[in-house]
Amino acid sequence: MLASHMASDLVSIIVAATYLASFLKIHKNSLQNDTQYPGAIVGRVVNRIGGAQFTLNGVHYKLDANEKPNMLHGGRKGFSLLTWNVEKYVKDRANPFIVLSYYSHDGEEGFPGNLLVRVTYALLEPYKLSVIMEAEALNKATPVNLAQHSYWNLGGHNSGDVLSDTVQIFGLHYTPANNQLIPTGEILFVKGTPYDFLKPHKIQSQMKGLPRGGAPSGYNVNYALDEGKDHKLKLAAIAYSKKTGIGMMISTSAPGLQFYTANYLNVTGKGGYVYQSHAAYCSETQGFPDAVNHPNPPSTIVNPGDLYVHNICPDLNQQINETHFHVKHCSVTLTIT
């Protein structure tokens, strides 16, 4: 994705693997080992499911434990690594869009039921993107929790780390996790913790307070967003890079946001540039991680006849600067004909 910076140049701000043809050629035999998920739609359930198992309606389901002993991002053959169908593509209009679909069969990676999934990408304005994820359970109740897994570097994809970027996250609470990143079941206030981005902060200034351990330091945490019900969009996060003057607002209908500072990123991308730890961040809007094993978070179960809907709207807004975060909601009005 390109954005215009303060000198009116176009800047590539999506950190991505090499383009599709060369990616498939080079990585044909290692796709199933991908742990980065750059730019992918992730599912059937994003994030982690503890113990790669859950019980639903009295039936116990064992899943693919691709991050032993847990499942991560839908398993070894999750939605990010599959071929989707193009249902419709319209480019010659004010709001170009593409509709992708995938039919997930009963038992895929251990999940119950047949599931029909559609994703619509639409360009609403020159620097505003809409992603609408929908899923319909066809014959059995099943967990569904889709996410769009883009890595953002508003300073430019090859500008180095993002730790000097300023971020604001509209979540009063977060869900702490154990050392395997499985939620403990608690929902805690962010105030007074290193997870507090209720006011704009540079990432590196807050990161200093994170617990130290053997893993690379950085964020990989789910926020409980403040407001919004019934699939309506609400403002989830704002980010700004002083390097380019580019700001971004993310609105979503989802109840949670996983803020991840690419702590383990190591992939060759555009122009052969090697992206390493903290070269980008993800703001993955989602249902809560491991919700299927916890009674308190918003449910991720979709029953036959129900429609799962998850909207996300990244808006590259030029009115954001380091001292003034101009807040407005993204609105999505899109008719697919």
Image (spheres, grey):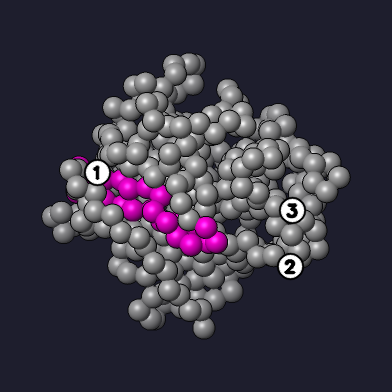
Taking the image as shown, residue 174 lies to the left or right of residue 272, namely right
Q: Is residue 301 visible?
A: yes
Give the Cα separation between the discs numbered 2 and 1: 44 Å
Which residue is under mark 2? 305
Q: Position of residue 245 (x, y in %)?
A: 19, 49
Q: Position of residue 85 (x, y in %)?
A: 61, 68
Q: Which residue corresponds to the image point at 32% horizontal and 69% vertical from the top-left?
A: 125
Answer few, some or many: residues within 10 Å of disc 3's Cα (few below 14, many 20 plus, some between 14 and 19): many
Q: Is residue 238 within the magenta segment?
A: yes
Which residue is under mark 1? 241
Mark 1 falls on what kind of element?
Answer: loop
Q: Nearer the viewer, mark 2 or mark 1?
A: 2
Residues at circles 1 and 3 in contact by the CB criterion of under 8 Å: no
Residue 142: numbered disc: 3
Answer few, some or many: residues within 10 Å of disc 1's Cα (few below 14, many 20 plus, some between 14 and 19): many
Amino acid found under the numbered disc labelled 1: Ser
Q: Nearer the viewer, mark 3 or mark 2?
A: 2
Q: Is residue 204 within the magenta segment?
A: no
